[in-house]
Image (cartoon, rainbow, N blue to C red):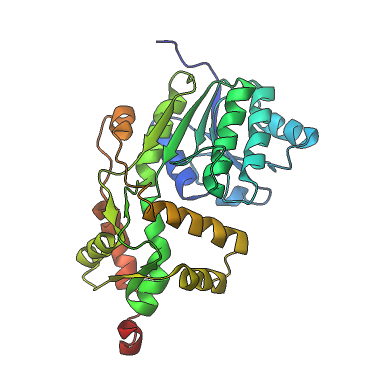
Amino acid sequence: MTAAPAGRIAVTGATGTLGSALVRELAARGHRPLALVRPGRAGAVVASADPVEAELGDGGPEAVRRLAEALSDTRALFLLTPFHPRQDLLQRTVIEAAAAAGVAHVVKLSALGADPESPVLVHRQHGLAERALADRGVAHTVLRPNAFTQNAAQWLGTIASRGAVLLPVGRARVSMVDVRDIAAAAATLLIGRPGDGEAYELTGPRALTYAEAAEELTAASGRRIRYLDVSEDVAREAMLGAGVPAWAVAARLQLYATYTAGEAETVSGALRELTGRPPRPFADFARLLAERIRALPAPGPAEVAR
């Protein structure tokens, strides 16, 4: 096996749920990564990483040059960018900068269903970025996770107000995957030899309905939580009312439609292949979320009855 080249490991998106989990995972394995963050966000980086402030920019030559400077002496890069209407453009900027800086290996966080021709915005963006990596000739590996288990924390608002998880997905099954497992897989790849374009679909151990997920939360917290199937119109109004931008609302509804079409049911063995252990079940995160659920105010009888 070819040894990994010398240099640092860099992580973009290092202050988010997955990025911070990856920084902790790398630190536990004896590495101190560079954490690329937006200007003014250095203070949010955990102590086990060295922050480097850099703007991803618009893909122009100057943006690429500045980012390439930030990536100097980097041998491996984890490519994760925020939910954005032009996420593919942000990622192309990073890819060009990585190539200019001589980064030996890029591990890209993609999505289950990524396809440059997909009508689903998120899947199309990731597919275009995957294509850009291949076209640029950068050694890379792609991780395509299903929905994050940690997204269940986004349900706390309606658990507090309605005692329920509200989503427009019917009886769809989703093999949600824990970000700690994704971080472990990413760390293994970043520490190892450069990839050759391999792509891994990452999932949890089984596909659950959201009613089953609500039952897991009930069992963990001791507080009754229901799943309520709502229409897309109701979900849209709720998201808009919470301040979610219209483009992001549309993108989320597209993803929910793929769930109802059965496209998120797949269960993969890739996590065990990469990490040597089975993926964490949803119940594991439910136990972590339980204390926050118990601390929520109880909804009134009228709200529960709705």
Residue 290 occupies quadrant: bottom left
Quarter of the image with the C terminus is bottom left
Position of residue 183 measured from the top left corner of the image (x, y, whole percent): 41, 39
Q: Is residue 147 above or below residue 167?
A: above
For residue 12, say whether it is visible: no
- Give the camera-side residue of 236 and 68: 236
Q: Is residue 295 above or below residue 40?
A: below
Furthest toward the bottom, the residue is 302
Residue lying at 41% horizontally and 41% vertically, measured from the top left = 145
Q: Is residue 260 above or below residue 223?
A: above
Residue 301 occupies quadrant: bottom left
Position of residue 69 measured from the top left corner of the image (x, y, whole percent): 71, 30
Quarter of the image with the N terminus is top left
Residue lying at 49% horizontally and 59% vertically, measured from the top left = 253
Total numbered circles: 0
Residue lying at 24% horizontally and 54% vertically, measured from the top left = 283
Position of residue 173 measured from the top left corner of the image (x, y, whole percent): 30, 53
Residue lying at 68% horizontally and 29% vertically, measured from the top left = 96
Position of residue 24 measured from the top left corner of the image (x, y, whole percent): 42, 41
Furthest toward the right, the residue is 62
Q: Going by the image, does 267 lie left or right of 95?
A: left
Furthest toward the top, the residue is 1
For residue 144, say whether it is visible: yes
- Give the camera-side residue of 227 and 223: 227
